């Protein structure tokens, strides 16, 4: 049941999901990477619960693709987020008008609904451990409710990280 609710929430969030931009080193052969771990000192700017969510989701998605989490990895994964709060752009419009004799007068206004929105820019870096070089980076921009429930946050991160990892490895042009 929990999985079903997360799936439904992720489908809803995907419809208004994050945008993802990717950059990478064109000289790197990404097929040689099959083991990973997280950068030893991650300072994500998020709380510990969100860090754990991101790591669990990333672990799950990478392991489904055949990657192995290792103490001697080929790739370090680092992630960090920048957040800002804004008012919801959703409003209900109310208008009053009247007129007669070829003259009309109207007054209208919008009432914000839905509360504040958390705008998040999540960056995920893949760093070649041997060379200590950044080889792949994805930046996802998305939004969720400022006071999202844990299930909503998990669904949001599943959606965002799926979109990010869909672009790894990069398509060779």
Image (tube, rainbow, N blue to C red):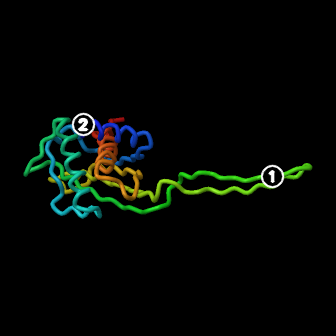
Disc 2 marks which residue? 1
For residue 42, side relative to residue 122 (left or right) = left
Q: Given this view, does label 1 or label 2 mark the residue nearer the observer?
A: 1
At mark 2, the secondary structure is loop
Q: Quadrant of the N terminus?
A: top left
Neighbourhood count class around disc 1 (C-alpha, 10 Å): few under 14, some 14–19, many 20 upward: few
Q: Nearer the viewer, residue 96 or 123?
A: 96
Q: Is residue 44 above or below residue 156?
A: below
Q: Residue at x 28, y 52 (%)?
A: 150
Mark 1 in CB contact with mark 2 (< 8 angstroms): no
Q: Say which quarter of the image contains residue 109.
A: bottom right
Q: Residue at x 13, y 44 (%)?
A: 35
At mark 1, the secondary structure is strand
- Residue 164's spot in the image, x, y percent? 32, 44
Q: Quadrant of the C terminus?
A: top left
For residue 72, side relative to residue 76 (left or right) = left
First in residue order: circle 1 vs circle 2 = 2
Q: Residue at x 26, y 62 (%)?
A: 47
Neighbourhood count class around disc 2 (C-alpha, 10 Å): few under 14, some 14–19, many 20 upward: few
Disc 1 marks which residue? 98
Identity of the residue furthest to the right in this view = 101
- Residue 127's spot in the image, x, y percent? 22, 53
Q: Is residue 14 above or below residue 43?
A: above
Q: Is residue 135 above or below residue 60?
A: below
Q: Is residue 163 above or below residue 137?
A: above
Identity of the residue furthest to the left in this view = 71
- Residue 158's spot in the image, x, y percent? 29, 44
For residue 82, side relative to residue 47 (left or right) = right
- Residue 93's spot in the image, x, y percent? 63, 51
């Amino acid at each position: 049941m929990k999985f079903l609710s997360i799936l439904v929430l992720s489908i809803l969030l995907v419809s208004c999901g994050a945008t993802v931009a990717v950059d990478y080193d064109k000289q790197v052969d990404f097929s040689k990477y099959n083991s990973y771990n997280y950068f030893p000192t991650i300072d994500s700017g998020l709380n510990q619960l969100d860090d754990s969510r991101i790591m669990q989701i990333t672990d799950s998605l990478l392991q489904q693709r055949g990657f192995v989490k290792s103490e001697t990895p080929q790739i370090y994964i680092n992630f960090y987020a920048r957040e800002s709060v804004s008012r919801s752009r959703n409003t209900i419009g109310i208008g009053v008008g009247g007129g007669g004799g070829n003259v009309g007068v109207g007054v209208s206004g919008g009432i914000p609904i839905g509360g504040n929105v958390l705008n998040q820019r999540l960056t995920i870096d893949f760093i070649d451990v041997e060379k200590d070089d950044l080889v792949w980076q994805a930046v996802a921009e998305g939004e969720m409710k400022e006071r999202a429930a844990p299930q909503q946050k998990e669904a949001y991160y599943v959606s965002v990280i799926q979109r990010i990892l869909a672009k790894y490895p990069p398509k060779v042009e």
